Amino acid sequence: MKKIIFALVAIIFSASVFSHGPTPQKVQESVTIAASPQKTWEALKNYSEIKKIMKVRSFKDKLMKAKYELIEKDVPFSDYNAQIRVKKGANDNESIVQWTARFYRTYKLNPPIPEGQDDATAVAAVKKIVGPGLEGFKKYVESQ
Amino acid sequence: MKQKKLSIFTSKILYFFILTFFLVFLYFIYLDSFNKENISKAYITNQGDNTVSVINLNSLKKVKTINVGVAPLGITVLQKKQLVFIGNVGTDDISVIDAVNDKLIKTIKLHTAPLSLTSNSEETEIYITDWFKNNILTISVEDLKVSGSFKVGKTPSGVTFNEKYQYIIISNRDENTIEIYDKDHKLVKKIKAGAHPFGIYSIDDFVYVANVYDDSVSVINLVDWSKYNFLVGAHPYNVRVHNEIAYITNTVDDTLTIFDLSSKKTIKTIETGETPENLDFNFKLNLLVNTNWGSDSISIFDAQSLQLIKEIKTGAQSRSFGDFILH
């Protein structure tokens, strides 16, 4: 419970903190998948759902790191870049997939910031892509 | 008689002890000053958790975390005066840290977002790019107060000081220009750069600026104002030059480009942590350090061999836009 409250406070705080300035925003989420890192990495390269949202910039096999940019233009955030990494889990048949996105709000000029163009709106919109995106990928790999 | 002899003996012993104690004391003071003078440190602004991490570059360990204002980004280190200036874009102020004991000694209110900072070579004046109101603000190092301001181009971003010509040089991100001002704050030259010029560096007769959207670096000659560009990795952020070699952070590729300015060729590309933003050297220890915004860390390389020595965890969203190493 304490952890949840702490996380909530952290989220509220981090969203309100960056009301000024051209500060890049970060959304970083992870999911644990019941498959070996190698199997998960190969699955990521073939998985089509993520490729519908993001264009692949590169797949670095050695580092198990994929780089993406956004396809859709009509979004409440800008300058989006992301990477997905596959890391070792607690055992050989488990992997951790981490999605990190870097982006800015759409309004970059002097405050006051118009509604819907602020940092909080941008963060919320990216979280809607990252969370469900990871869940969908987990289901895909574990059903293989 | 016997008692007197004994007391002389005791006082001699006492004298000896006092002398020894004094010498040991002096030795420790000497050792302490020796240590302080010789420790090199990196100061890392962590924009995500409102702190500055202090990294001892001799022991390669994080030694302290200092609370500063909200969303710290820009930084400059005064080597002679042993002061660190931090720009907080969330609280619109400057945190001043005493680098001898790593304590916050002053907060200077600006009422506008300080994007980056540098100082003149005498370390008497700090220059700050004022992102929202398109100024350069100056701070007097002696008074630790805002001493003035002057108008510049739109969205001033990076700032650097050229020691040879005593120029203040800035990049204006959203209008794709570089502006060069003299010591009296008079505009000497305004030049087109690439798309979204950001991190900037100047030494001897040249200015180097990373163009984020063009994946390039512009090199500008301060004598004849000639200019050329060279390509680097994806979304370069900052650049440093040493001995005719340019070192560039590529934020989207997680790499550094090592470019030979004499032969105009990329010598090497090396892997960093995630989203490398800024970089600085320590030539005394032969180190090249870069901040990793994505992995909340710094990467420390051997400046000669470019081998990774260590990656050290810092705080959330490590940036340090500016010179961040105390030599």
Image: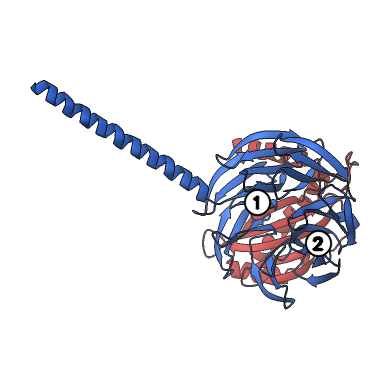
Chain colours: A red, B blue
Disc 2, SS: loop
Q: How many marks?
A: 2
Most foreground residue, B129 or A32: B129
Label 2 Cα crowd, 10 Å radius (few <14 / some 14-19 / many 20+): many
Left or right of residue A23: residue B308: left
Is residue B215 in view from this perspective?
no
- Subunit of mark 1? B
Residue for badge 2: B212
Q: Amino acid at mark 1?
A: Phe
Residue for badge 1: B324
* Mark 1 or mark 2, whichever is nearer to me: 1
Most foreground residue, B239 or A128: B239
- Subunit of mark 2? B
Q: Amino acid at mark 2?
A: Val
**Location of residue A122 with respect to A69 vertically, above or below:** above
As drawn, the residue found furthest toward the front would be B1
Disc 1, SS: loop
Image quadrant where residue A144 sits? bottom right
Q: Are marks 1 and 2 in contact (CB under 8 Å)?
A: no
Is residue A15 in view from this perspective?
yes
Please state the horizontal and vertical placement of residue B222, each as a whole percent of the image. 82, 63
**Location of residue B182 with respect to B266 vertically, above or below:** above
Looking at marks 1 and 2 on the same chain, the residue that comes earlier in the sequence is marked by 2
Most foreground residue, B2 or B112: B2
Please state the horizontal and vertical placement of residue A17, each as a whole percent of the image. 75, 39
Image quadrant where residue B2 sits? top left
- Quadrant where the N terminus of chain B sits is top left
The CA span between labels 1 and 2 is 21 Å
